[in-house]
Amino acid sequence: MTTSSQWVAGFRSALVSPYEDYQLFPSRAFAEQTVRQIVRLAGGGEAVRVRLSNRFGRQPLTVGAARWARRTEGHGIDPATSVPLTFDGRADLVLAPGEEAVSDPVPGAVAAGDEFALSLHLPYDTGLATFSVVASETGYAAAGDVTDEAALPDAELLELSRYFVSGVDVLAPEGTAIAVAFGDSWMEGAGTTPGANARFPDQLNRLLDRGWVVNQGISGNRLLTDEIGEAGLTRVHRDVLDVPGVTHVLLNFGLNDLGSPGSIDPGTPQPLPSAEQLIEGYRELAALLRAAGLTVVAHTIGPYAGTVYEGYDTEEGRAIRREVNDWIRTTDTFDAVTDVAAAVEDPADPERILPAYDCGDHLHLNDAGTLAMARAVDLSYLKL
C-alpha cells in the first residue's frame, strides 16, 4: 500500500428494508447456512475491503466466518485464492440491528471485471435480510459452514437479489474518479439478463477509458416518496455523498414517481406528483450534490406506455413526463444531461420503448436497451 493510494468504491449494491409494506421481491432469512454471492468489480486497485450490513435488520446478525475468493464459474471458486475476511482482527462478527461493518484490508491486485465470490457462514437465524432488490446476479446457499469449499454441496439458487452486502472498496491510485449511478430500476438493471453484467453501469464502464461507475440503483425507487427503498432525496447522503472517492453522479428518477401511485392498488390510485413537484425535487437534489463538489448528469425519464403493470401507465403521467423532460433538456440545474428517453424510444410512438430495446414488459430495457442508454452518454462530461 502506497501513500499515493486512496480507498474508493469498487462495487456497490444499494440496500432496502425487507419490512416495507409494498415489496415486489420479498427478502428471506437464513440459518446455519453458507451464502455465497458473486461480486464483479467495476474498478481495480492493490487491495480490497468488504462492506457488510444489517442496516434494516430487526435482530442481531452473526457471521461465523467470511471468505473472499476468485470465482471460477457458477458457485465455484479457486481454492488457492480463498482468504478469510477479518473485522478488527476477528474472524467472526456480530452486527446489531442498524449496524454495518467494513472488513480489514485484503492485499493483492484486482482489476475491473474481476469476479469474486463472497462466502458468509450464517450460523443463527438472521431474520429477514437487509437486501438489494434486483441485483440481476445469482447467489447460492448451502447447509453448514462450507465457506472454503471449492463448490457448494447441494447448492440452492438465490435468484436476482443480494443479501447483507453493501459494497467493496478498492485501494486505487489517488485521484481515481468514481461516478455513482443513482436512481431506479433503469440503473439497478431490472430487465437485463441475470449474470450477464448488462446493467446500464456495466455497459457504461465498457465505454470508459479511465475511472468507473458503481451502481446505487433500486428497482421501484422514487425521487420524492419512500416506497421500495427510501426516497432518492433521503438516501442520497448514504448512497452517494458517503461513497468513498465519488466525483460524479448520474441521476435516473421519475418513472416510479409517475407510475407507482397508480399500480400499487389500481382500484384506489394515489395522486401523482405534479411536474412542479418533481422539478423542485430535482433542483433540491442537484443543489445538494453540486454543493458537495460533484459533477451532476441527469437523465430524461424514459418511456413506458403500454406496460404490463396495471395502473402504471396513465395519460396524466405521460403528460407530466413530457413536461419534466422538456425542463431537464433545457435547464442549467445540472452539469450535463443524457437524453435517455430519445435514445430508447420508438420513433413511431415516442411514448413507448423501441421493441428492440424492450425486455418484454414495456417498462424496462433489455441488454441492447441498456447499451443504447450507455452510448447516449456524452463521455466528455463525465471526465473520468
Image: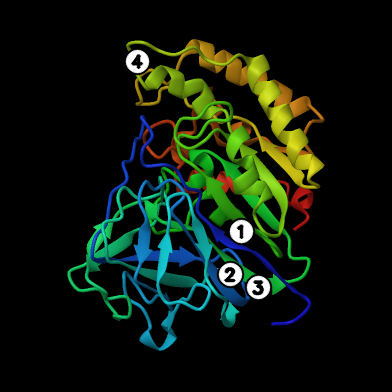
Give the CA distance from mark 1 to mark 4: 38 Å
In the image, which is nearer the foreground, mark 3 or mark 4? 3
Q: CA distance from mark 2 to mark 1?
A: 9 Å
Q: Residue furthest left?
A: 154
User: Mark 3 against mark 2, which lies toward the viewer?
Assistant: 3
The residue tagged 2 is: 112
Compute the Cα span from label 3 to label 2: 13 Å
Tag on residue 205? 1
Q: Which residue is mark 4?
A: 266
Left/right placement of residue 264 relative to residue 207 reads left
Q: Residues within 10 Å of mark 4 (few under 14, many from 20)?
A: some
Q: Is there CB contact under 8 Å for labels 2 and 1?
A: yes
Mark 1, secondary structure of its residue? helix
Pick out the residue farthest to the bottom.
80
Q: Quadrant of residue 296?
A: top right
Q: Nearer the viewer, residue 45 or 302?
A: 45
- Classify residue 63 as left or right of residue 203: left
The answer, for residue 151, to whether it is visible in the render is yes
Residue at image mark 3: 171
Count of numbered badges drawn on the protein = 4
